[in-house]
Amino acid sequence: MRLHDKLLGLLCAGLGVLLFALTLNFPALPGQKVGPSLFPRLIGIGLVLCGLVIAWQARHRPGPWAVVSDSLRGRGAAGFAVMLGAVLLYLLSAERVGFIPAATVVVALVALWLGVRAWQAWALGVGSALVLQWFFGTLMRVPLPRGWFMQLLFGG
Amino acid sequence: MSAVIAAFGLVFDPYVLLVVVLSAVFGLFVGAIPGLTATMATALLVPVTFFMPPVAALGAIVAATTMAIFAGDIPGAMLRMPGTPASAAYVDESYAMARKGQLELNLGANLVFSVLGGLVGVVCLIAFAPLLAEAALNFSSFEYFWLACLGLSCATLISSGPKVRALVSLLIGLGVGTVGIDPVAGHPRFTFGSVDLMSGISMIPTMIGAFALSELLRSAGTPGATGALVQEKVGALFTGMAGVMRQYWRNFLRGSVVGTAIGALPGAGADIAAWVSYAMARRFSKQPEKFGTGHVEGVVESTSSNNAALGGAWIPALVFGIPGDSITAIVIGVLYMKGMNPGPTVFLQNPQFIYAVFIIFILANLLMLPLGWAAIKSAGRILRAPKPMLLPVILLFCIVGSFAITNSPYGIWVMLVFGVLGWVMEEHGIPVAPLVLGIVLGELLEQSFLTSLIKADGSLLAFFTRPIAGVLGAATLVVWGWMAWSALRPAAPATPAARP
């Protein structure tokens, strides 16, 4: 999705206004003219100005408010959704089921989508999950989610 | 002198050397695969370096990036697909040479002049960084404020596409940098009650998202089939190199010096250096009509330039904590993680680490000769690496890497949000690099600005009263004036931004 520059500019300006508004309840620094709100407010003002410049420059440019961009045509949109969905799937499932099963499914699903044969995709999933579990979990002692999978294997 | 000896001891440790060699191989592989960039290689390396001692961590990044920038030339010549954006400037020239049967000459020149250009960049880094650091010891918050301003303004000015979009990217980055406890009053800002947000938006997951995940989101629809290689086997690479050197030594020197200077400019990296040097080679050539038809002159100048830019980019990063390009923006994050806060004092407090970085830079450039030779010889196999099998593994690496930095799903959420944001921004022609520079430099900018304002009791004139601050301030105002002029000019519709 690609927005027309008029809309993009207005969105930038809106973001600036929001940033400014969120600083209104910041406390002042006692005895000083400056405080925690000054810098974010300057950024907000900058965003408003930039947004207005973008919208102003595009004021005579014809075209719809939004168009489907090239990268989302054909398989692009589905590919985008698969990648995004894979990360979300990991986030929602890893704590419960554990790192190895969640990582296996994420890798296999993305590989299947990209056209890898089923057995290769699942082998890739299992292999990469085990290697990363060994490297990060065992070697680097990163507390990767254990979930029921590790509890089943090692108890606790 | 004892620091130099200590640095040699730190570098020539078997563990560090192994890390450097493995990272070099990793960099060669990532650089040679079209679509995977040197910045992405760095972002993916950071979670691993998190667990290493400082010298090994910095060695890994230096080796991987040095190799990746060179390796991008290989698919450029053999497939007409630049492995990294730094090779894009002369990809047509390289491919034209390959089509004329000069693949060996092209790849040989790319390898040899990448090594030599890289070494010139390192020599400049070794010569200028300590001198600048000595001068920077006298800097106060006023000078740091203007340096940060000048750095961020140059990054915006130099970026491709309309400057106002780069400015939006920068402002969003600065805005993101304000999340968390404010550096002067200690008040929590934009945290919405979240404990994770109190310590700010985690920098490394942000970069993994903006540089790696956004790229994966883009390539998921069309992972891209590898085209036919122009030539299966590569012959002798070094034949004729002495002749090329004799004929084009001026191009090599000019490319290396210009590359180093552009690398040292905040925000401009190896890709811009290569474009500028290619254009200069054509402008000053005695045979400009040969450019584009498979002529080695432009290749020599621009391939020297992009590798020299890497060393140059470390000068402001080490001396002032101001990144020279998107790779050093990540490096600054690593330096902070390792307790080596960049700035002139690091040259006093930890000189052995700085010398170790210099030694590793030289080592990595020398290693490029044999490893690069091997990579070119096995290019057929590397270039056939199936992207549909690589992309899911890279995605998993992004997830685990982001988790490893925060030890919680918060890192993954940050990566996801910035991956989507990076994708949306590039769809709208808004470059991502200024966003990252804004996040990295936001705290320095705000802290030096507020401290200076408090010192000066709110007077803006005090920002110009110290001599160096005055010069830096005037230079910044000139850059701002230029930007305002170019922003208010009628602009053509934006094209999607160049990738980092």
Image (tube, coloured by chain):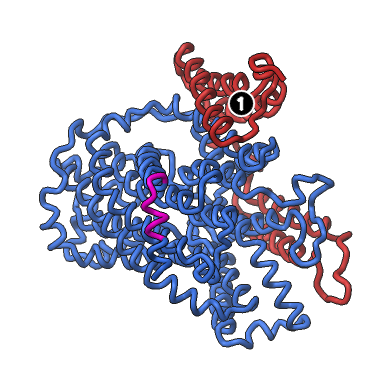
Picture coordinates of residue A43 (x, y %)? 71, 62
Q: Which chain is blue?
A: B
Picture coordinates of residue B233 (x, y %)? 18, 32
Give left or right: position of B402 versus B365: right
Give the residue displayed 44% in from the left and 61% down from the top: B313
- B80, above or below B464, in the image: above
Give the residue displayed 42% in from the left and 59% down from the top: B357
Picture coordinates of residue B56 (x, y %)? 45, 49
Examine the structure image and report whether residue B448 is included in the region drawn in magenta. Answer: no
Name the image quarter holding residue B398.
top right
- B242, above or below B452, in the image: above
Residue B263 visible within the image: no
Q: Which of the two residues, B80 or B28, is positioned nearer the viewer here? A: B28
Say which element carries label 1: helix
Picture coordinates of residue B85 (x, y %)? 40, 48
- Crowding at dot 1, Cα within 10 Å, few <14 / some 14-19 / many 20+, comes out as many
Q: Quadrant of the N terminus of chain B?
A: bottom left
Name the image quarter holding residue B179.
bottom right
Q: Which of the two residues, A21 or A96, is positioned nearer the viewer here? A: A96
- B408, above or below B87, in the image: above
Q: Which chain is red?
A: A
Which contiguous range is marked in magenta?
Answer: B7-15
Residue B139 visible within the image: yes
Give left or right: position of B323 versus B22: right
Give left or right: position of B427 versus B91: right
Please tell me whether the stretch drawn in magenta is mainly helix, strand or loop.
Answer: helix
Name the image quarter holding residue A48.
bottom right
Examine the structure image and report whether residue B13 is included in the region drawn in magenta. Answer: yes
Residue at the spot of label 1: A86
